[in-house]
Image: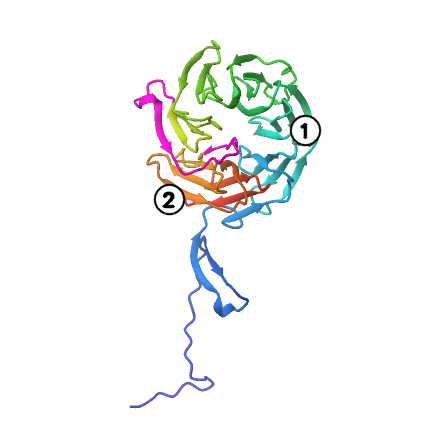
Amino acid sequence: MIRKSPPPGSQGTLIKRARPASPSNEQQVIISTSGNEKEQGLIRTVTRTSGLDAPIVSLAGAHGGEILCCRFDPTGQFIAACSADRTVSLWRTYPPNTNYGQLTNVHKAPILDLQWSLSSSSIYTAGADGNLCISDLTTGTRIRRIKAHQGVVNSLDRIATGGTELLVTGGDDGAVRVWDVGANGQGEDAREPVKEFEIGCPVTAVCWSSDAAQIYVAALDNCIHTYDLRTEERLHTLKGHTDTPASLVISPGLGNYILSPSFSSQTLIHDIRPFSPHPHRIYRQLQGAPAGFENTLARGAWSKYDGGRRVAVGGADRSVTVWDVESGRILYKLPGHKGTVTCVEFHPKEPIVLTGSKDGTMLLGEIDPSL
């Protein structure tokens, strides 16, 4: 056999250069139990689905108490969270995820719920001091304080309709009140409610229908009551819970369904269309998010980026359960917190889940939209 000698100047080693990989939206997740690089093992390749820096991002250090509510703004660029430490923290959703603001001296008691204004730079907060407060985010100051209820204000919702913005609040005094804060969200004429409903027992959650014609009210009687805003009459009552509903969320789009987790660890989806084919209007019964014994007003969420295919609720097992609405099966059990998960929110445009917990931290996590 005749061997060909290598060309002059070469060392006789043939090296095949790897073709440069085209840019991809994937990251390799590597874990190591020691500092030796040879002992590092490839766990899996993660396909990125959002604009976050990492699949999971922790937002911590802003609160000294449990986080009771956290929400994206309508654009999804910013996050607001309220806490038992009586402050509101403001964050950027995307890198560098900074805590760019902290609202203090807003309430004199824990802040239980908040909502971003849909038409202005205002943010609305409801607290255990019975007050509904309006703060201006451009100046970071409170511009309006309204004595909304005689006791704790448990829930707050807002909707833009007819050139103005309406708020609805529900509290431990058994009352539900509607406030007109104007198109600019400043609430100059919101000293008195424009509508008022007496439920007869403490109210745990309120929300608007998609057309602002009706208000849904969850109360201590284990029922969800529907009131007509124009006639001020109770239209019907949604039953099925064996314990108190903790929160209410309307499905995106036409608003045909309403999600309600409860203290019994059962989460129900009711069909609220005018003519429902389902007995007792119960569309889905979901299990998997334990409520625990603390009677936390866990705030569920309905996905918006995919037209409402998923719902999520936090639990006392320190995780978030995400279900597929059509099949009712569990898609995710998302861990990471060190305390009960009190609130969940879906990003309005990307497959991102925001969670807040009694451990005083928030987590941003990607999910796979193809599941």
**Percent position (x, y) of residue 137?**
65, 31
Under circle 2, the secondary element is: loop
Residue depicted at 55% across the width and 39% down the height: 357
* Residue placed under numbered mark 1 in the picture: 106
Position of residue 203 relative to residue 62, above or below, is: above
- Mark carried by residue 370: 2
Residue range corresponding to the magenta coloring: 272-301
The residue at the point 46 percent across, 15 percent down is 227
For the C terminus, give its image quadrant.
Answer: top left
How far across and down, in percent of the image, does residue 37 sit?
51, 68
Question: Can residue 210 be found in the magenta stretch?
Answer: no
Q: Amino acid at mark 1?
A: Val
Q: Residues within 10 Å of mark 2 (few under 14, many from 20)?
A: few
Query: Residue 267: where, in percent of width, then height?
Result: 41, 31
Q: Amino acid at mark 2?
A: Ser
How packed mark 1 is, by other alpha carbons closer than 10 Å (few <14, some 14-19, many 20 or more), is: many
Q: Which mark is first along the chain, 1 or 2?
A: 1
Name the quadrant containing residue 72.
Answer: top right
Which of the image's four quarters has the N terminus? bottom left
Decide: is 69 above or below 240. below
Above or below, comparing residue 94 to residue 133 in the picture: below
* In front: label 2 or label 1: 1
Q: Outermost residue toward the front?
A: 293
The spot of residue 208 in percent (x, y) is 48, 22
Left or right of residue 139: residue 169: left
Question: Which one is nearer the viewer's eye here, 118 or 328?
Answer: 328
Q: Nearer the viewer, residue 141 or 154?
A: 154
Q: CA distance from mark 2 to mark 1?
A: 42 Å
Residue 194, picture quadrant: top right
